[in-house]
Image (cartoon, rainbow, N blue to C red):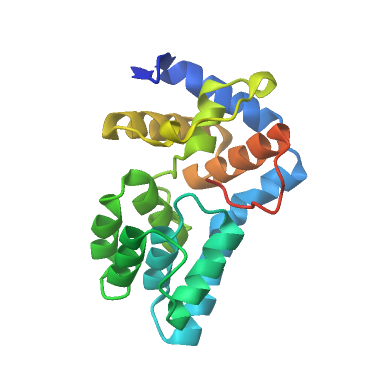
Amino acid sequence: MNIQFKNEKLTSSGVTRRLLHYYSLANDTDIENRNWYIDANNFCNEIGEIYNKPSFQVAGVCAALSPMKNWQSNMKLTRDFMKGSRGGHYGTQIQKASQCLKSSEDEIFYVLTKNGLKTSQFYLNISNPLDVNGVTIDRHAIGASIYSPKNIKTLPDSHGLMSVNQYKFFQSCYINASIIVECRPHEFQAIIWSVYRRLKNLPQEYNVPF
């Protein structure tokens, strides 16, 4: 399978090999990061218990408020939102977060898909961390797909904008690679995120895998 992405000609086999190369560079800390979505799910469970809300609705709020935010900021925005604050993000994100508190699990997915597949998939991975379907594809996931570990570059925001076919292409590459190393697709993505960030020497406090 081939695809054109931002003037890059990519093949499924080529991207899968590159992702497996990143995986081969993982240290113990990177491998431990495979549990990131379980930890995020635990956070949503704790917040849900405090405010008597289903954890999937909290996961929806968290995902709705996640674009362009690191995980520490994302958690703070979620806590503040559940306390009643409606600031700290764009109005459209706040509106979608509000909708999530009134919606079923399936409805939340469709509400968030209006922002693109990344946000809705982030919700699914947090809400159902033991599920094997789907991968959160963000700029870091794309960066590891198109740049070798020795040539990592800062991606512009525009690289986070993808067509449905482009998103599914990158997702399929992560799924293919995860099957080879025998882990869940989103666990593989979290590991690659950790390797990518470490090699790029970015601050660790921005601890979110997308």
Residue 30, image quadrant? top right
Question: Of all residues shown, which one is farthest toward the right?
Answer: 28
Q: At which x and y percent is residue 191?
A: 62, 42
Whether residue 102 is visible, yes or no, is yes
Q: At which x and y percent is residue 10?
A: 42, 16
Is residue 12 depicted above or below 193 in this figure? above
> Which quadrant does the N terminus fall into?
top left
Residue pictured at 68% horizontal, 29% vertical: 24
Q: At which x and y percent is residue 56?
A: 38, 69
Residue in the foreground of this view, choosing between 87 and 124? 87
Whether residue 1 is visible, yes or no, is no
Image side of residue 86 versus residue 26, left or right: left
Residue pictured at 23% horizontal, 64% vertical: 107
Is residue 208 depicted above or below 45 in this figure? above
Residue pictured at 27% horizontal, 69% vertical: 99
Residue pictured at 24% horizontal, 56% vertical: 110
Q: At which x and y percent is residue 83?
A: 47, 82
Residue 137, image quadrant? top left
Residue in the foreground of this view, choosing between 104 and 199? 199
Image side of residue 110 versus residue 152, left or right: left
